[in-house]
Amino acid sequence: MGFEIPASVRPVRDAVHAFMTERVEPAEPVLRRGGDEAAALVADLQREAKAEGLWALGHPKELGGGGLPFLDYVYVNEVQGRSEFGQLALGTYTLQDSLMLHRHAGEAQRERFLKPLVQAEINPSFAMTEPGIASSDPTQLRTTATLEDGEWVIRGRKWFTTFADRAAYTTVMCRTEPEDAPPHLAFSMILVPTDTPGYTIVRDTPVLGLDGGHCEVVYDDVRVPEDNLLGPRGHGFVIAQERLGPGRIFHCMRFLGQAQRAFDLMCARLHERTAFGEPLYKKQLLQQHVFDSYAEIQSARLLTLQAAHKIDSGDHGLGAEARVEIGVIKVVAARMLNNVIDRAIQVHGAEGLTDDTPLGHMYRHARAGRIFDGPDEVHVTTTARRILREYREGRNWEFALR
């Protein structure tokens, strides 16, 4: 296998890169302020993306998307990730939800949620994490749904339900089975329209000083029809695993886009500034920042592409080998991004601490990346256990065959 960008992908990747650097990145100050002006600007960017054939590139064609194969889209996602607003502008923020519905939704659910989702006519949200418990162990989740007179009645509290305040519905992970059920067959996914009585947004939870739409939501006897169940009853963990495997690769490729941007800013700064009579790029300590950043970015990139190759070859995140690769890249890529942005801030000095560059916002989002979709410690532990299991069973982990 090779890691060169395929010739068929290069034109669309270049077009997305130009869209990001020429239109999305310059618009970030307005987009971060929020409000009506930001909403209008997002709508304009989305119209331009559709007009230029850059809309929803990773969605299947039968859903109205660009139909890029998984590995091809990974290369595009890398440059789309340069800005936190890339997904919204290019119609891929809904990709994980769209693929989940495409695989598991019934016909009525597809008509109501899936079709408008791909065209950005509605927004989704996903509720799994809960306050007060270690949600890295989702068997502890306390939100419940009981079936009463043909309706699911949901009771509980979720938080970090991203963009619930602008979503048409939330996919809620909740316990539907009795206490004696096997833990990983005790939870289900249920689709809950956000205008349902009892669905109450408590707050937008600030994350490292940023209001990023990470909502805390109370479910107070929320009632939805029985057929709002997504997929088979008790299969919430199976659906979540299918969602999270490829989703983590998408996250890691966007991390790489952020790292590339921080690396560019750092190297440009080294050439622009002088100290003690010579340009910064001649300082050996700062050359070390360039070397370390290059090594970490390239290592994370090759690991991520290898994991994407495994999924593209048919292992959709469910096999042991793909789980090892995905667990590794989630930790390595998140740490890499934190390190690279930190060095870029250091090179910028006092300016790096201000909002005159995008580095401060990038840094806070990067730190959250070491917790979102499972903290580093969980991925380290589960990955090591999977590798050690091979030795316990009399085999070894032959890297050349992986």
Image: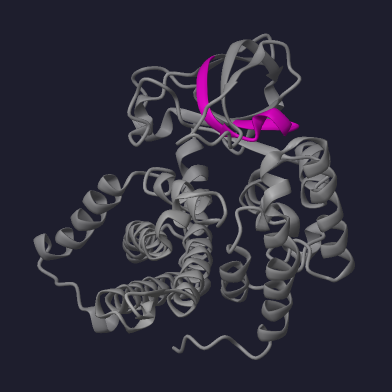
On the image, the x and y values in percent for residue 258 come to 51, 63
Magenta stretch: give its range. 156-171
Residue in the image at 53% along x and 68% along y:
261
Q: Main secondary structure of the magenta part?
A: strand
On the image, the x and y values in percent for residue 318 come to 42, 57
124 vs 394, left or right, is right
Question: Which quadrant is the C terminus positioned in?
Answer: bottom left
Any part of residue 233 in sight: no
- From this view, report whether residue 157 is shown above or below residue 46: above
- From this view, report whether residue 139 is shown above or below residue 231: above
- Quadrant location of residue 155? top right
On the image, the x and y values in percent for residue 308 come to 48, 70
Question: Which quadrant is the N terminus positioned in?
Answer: bottom left
Query: Could you tell me how many numbered marks the image carries?
Result: 0
In the image, 97 versus 295, the foreground residue is 295
Residue in the image at 60% along x and 88% along y:
6
Q: Is residue 389 magenta?
A: no
On the image, the x and y values in percent for residue 236 come to 50, 36
Farthest residue, direction front: 277
Any part of residue 240 in sight: yes
- From this view, report whether residue 385 is shown above or below residue 164: below
227 vs 329, left or right, is right
Residue in the image at 77% along x and 35% along y:
35
In the image, 311 versus 43, the foreground residue is 43
In the image, 298 versus 347, the foreground residue is 347
Residue in the image at 42% along x and 54% along y:
350
